[in-house]
């Protein structure tokens, strides 16, 4: 994901010996310079924007690939996708009118490593992408990061007054497992509101999105 990752075995002083997903600290740190490609196309209905890639996501090369990240189940439960897609099937999203990007490209262990300058630059890059690809909606996944990047201290989940060119902005909760006070059901409800606003059909086919199909 976007937005940092937790967990992992820890040694003296609380320093991790093994990273999340069974990756070593060395493997994770080596991913700090890797860039995660966007999944974009012209005229998408919704582009989901993570805060920044976590290190596990950067190692694996797919968006929201960290253990415990609830993005893909939320897409299915809210009807954006007909099943829980594994991250390596992210390339199927444009066919459903969906895309993926990040506010900040630099991978980190957590969003606390990001700077105000990176947030400010990220907004300008998002603006450039919106003007180029012209999605209907940009869904930013993270209230704290949105407030910091856009200077919107009172922003709450839902549609925002902010626009990027002709692209409207919707603020969603961060799907990271760290954001546990947002339950899976609550995430699905908020994602469903965006799906309806974007005029997309409910593709859940009456399932709860609990089973991934690889």
Image (spheres, grey):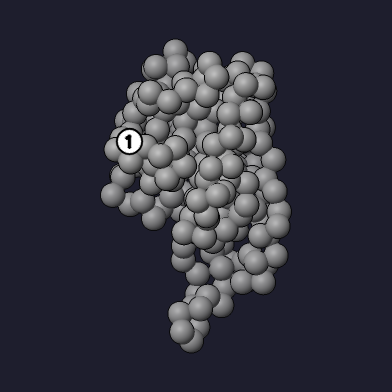
Q: Which residue is tagged 1?
A: 155
Q: Quadrant of residue 130?
A: top right
Residue 4 in view in this figure: no
Vertical relation: 137 (above or below) 29:
above
Residue 183 in view in this figure: yes
> In which quadrant will I find the C terminus?
top right
Few, some or many residues within 10 Å of mark 1 (<14, 14–19, 20+):
some
Horizontal and vertical percent for residue 95? 63, 21
Q: Nearer the viewer, residue 102 or 19?
A: 102
Horizontal and vertical percent for residue 126? 58, 33
Count of labels in the image: 1
Vertical relation: 102 (above or below) 136:
below
Apparent side of residue 7 relative to residue 30 in the rendered image (left or right):
left
The structure residue drawn at horizontal position 62% and vertical position 35%, both measured from the top left corner, is 125
Q: Residue furthest bottom?
A: 12
Apparent side of residue 141 relative to residue 100 in the rendered image (left or right):
left
Horizontal and vertical percent for residue 82? 50, 26
Apparent side of residue 153 relative to residue 149 in the rendered image (left or right):
left
The structure residue drawn at horizontal position 34% and vertical position 28%, both measured from the top left corner, is 158
The structure residue drawn at horizontal position 67% and vertical position 72%, both measured from the top left corner, is 26
SS of the residue under disc 1: loop
Q: Quadrant of residue 161?
A: top left
The structure residue drawn at horizontal position 44% and vertical position 13%, both measured from the top left corner, is 199
Horizontal and vertical percent for residue 115? 52, 54
Apparent side of residue 97 relative to residue 194 in the rendered image (left or right):
right
């Amino acid at each position: 994901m976007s937005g940092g990752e937790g967990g992992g075995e820890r040694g003296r002083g609380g320093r991790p010996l093994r990273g999340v997903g069974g990756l070593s600290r060395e493997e994770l740190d080596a991913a700090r310079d890797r860039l995660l490609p966007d999944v974009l196309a012209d005229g998408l209905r919704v582009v989901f924007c993570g805060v920044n890639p976590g290190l596990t996501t950067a190692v694996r090369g797919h968006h929201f690939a960290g253990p415990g990240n609830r993005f893909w189940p939320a897409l299915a439960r809210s009807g954006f996708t007909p099943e829980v897609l594994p991250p390596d099937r992210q390339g199927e999203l444009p066919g459903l009118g969906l895309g993926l990007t990040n506010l900040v490209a630099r991978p980190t262990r957590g969003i606390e490593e990001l700077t105000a300058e990176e947030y400010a630059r990220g907004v300008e890059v998002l603006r450039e992408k919106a003007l180029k690809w012209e999605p209907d909606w940009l869904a930013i996944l993270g209230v704290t990061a949105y407030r910091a990047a856009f200077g919107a201290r009172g922003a709450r989940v839902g549609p925002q007054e902010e626009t990027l060119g002709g692209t409207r902005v919707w603020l969603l909760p961060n799907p990271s497992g760290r954001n546990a006070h947002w339950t899976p059901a609550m995430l699905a409800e908020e994602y469903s509101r965006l799906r309806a606003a974007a005029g997309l059909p409910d593709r859940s086919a009456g399932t709860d999105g609990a089973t991934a199909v690889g």
